[in-house]
Amino acid sequence: MRNETLKQPAERGDRSRHVALALLILVYTLNFLDRQILSILKEPIAADLHLSDTDLGLLGGFAFALFYSVLAIPAAWLADRFSRVWIITAGLFLWSLFTALCGMATGFAVLFVARMGVGVGEAGGVAPAYSLIADYFPPRAQARALAIYSFGIPIGSAAGVLFGGLVANAIDWRFAFLAIGAFGVLLAPAFRLLVRDPPRQATAAAGQLGLAAVARLAAGKPTFWLLAFGCGCSSLVAYGLMYWLPTFLARTLHMDIVARSQLLAAVLFFGGIAGMGAGGWLGDKLGSRGKRAYALIPAVAFLLSAPLYALAILARTPLETFLLLLLPYALALVWLGPVLTAVQHLAPAGSRSTMSALFLLVNNLIGLGLGPYFFGRLSDALMPTYAADSIKYAFLFGLGFYLVAAVLLYFASRRIARDWVE
């Protein structure tokens, strides 16, 4: 199980690396499908289990994010020393099993525990994949490869809301969880058979550090903290918006579950692909000219996202909302390719999984942990004043976090060249 091929890596053909990338995208798609499906199913779940907006915010935030973020650290440490493919396989099997169990929930407590189980499994899915991609692709193509891998986010999110909405309308919300969970359980052994752990870069053995050493390394690099907290602020808004947009469409625009799942699926897919593709392309093109670009590109994108999102939230018809959501959603995801590339180069090659996991710990505790809960809690607080429009005004207040994110990323751009590790 231990990866012993830490010396000079053999040349890997385009076919093997592209097959591996395609399967990693499929697994990441399922990762976000399992994560995002809860957002479109909130209303039937709330009606069935008698849940408040605060309860729903906890299910979408802390129930998942706490274990997902914290356990990603030991999973990444293991991935720097053992088979990354085995770790991803085990994670896929576990989170799919708990997704199926969500469909058997009889109350808030059972569903909360099942969502925690999904987070436990997904903890082993992302950081090892970043490390695999960094070893499969040369530095000049890593931002694009990581951005393409991140296509799993919009594809999975779109599939989750569309599949969940259609199945809930045709059958019920429980069957949606059961069907998706079963698919992931069946995919896990196929992934293990078809993907191989590539040899790690030649410097990996010398650069392989312990968890405490990587944590000290991150603590001493201002770029790490500025990137992590900046992207965490943006993720707070992004995760919160995507989780609560179905509720906004239901309460403010009075759309049924099929209509809102179709609208959101289109926004998530087309806006997400465009934003991630643009971020990866810009990161490789401008990053080769200067390291500052890896932070400045997302800073500008965040700065533009806030007012554009406000226009979409204030729109009066579903068509206006759809058209106005596309651009800010795309801009909000531009950061993935450039920033993930930068994080990979804040540590030696042998410790990239651990450094990525530390970054994801901060980013996800803020974004995933606080985002859905923040907007749900604020919506409940604003309900006496704004009634059904309370989630709409919660969105408008929360957009200020994008401005904070832009400032933090700008300061990261001033330090990034000094903290970079080739």
Image (spheres, grey):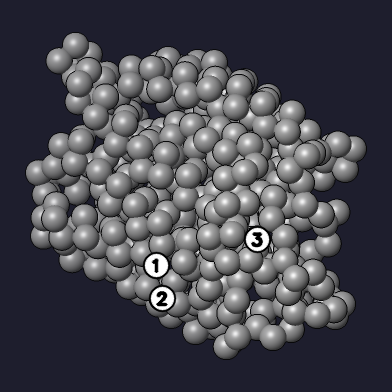
Q: Distance of mark 3 from mark 1, alpha carbons? A: 20 Å
Q: Secondary structure under badge 1?
A: helix
Left or right of 387 in this view: 264? right
Q: Distance of mark 2 from mark 3, alpha carbons? A: 24 Å
Q: Which residue is mark 2?
A: 93
Query: Foreground: 387 or 12?
Result: 12
Measuring 36% from the left and 43% from the top, which residue is drawn there? 369
Q: Which residue is mark 3?
A: 352
Q: Which residue is mark 1?
A: 121
Measuring 21% from the left and 35% from the top, which residue is drawn there? 53
Q: Secondary structure under badge 2?
A: helix
Measuring 58% from the left and 66% from the top, which residue is drawn there? 210
Query: Foreground: 4 or 128?
Result: 4
CB atoms at circles 3 and 1 under 8 Å apart?
no
Q: Earlier in the sequence, mark 2 or mark 3?
A: 2
Q: Earlier in the sequence, mark 2 or mark 1?
A: 2
Q: Quadrant of the N terminus?
A: bottom right
Q: Is residue 164 among the parts visible in the rendering?
A: no
Left or right of 147 in this view: 396? left
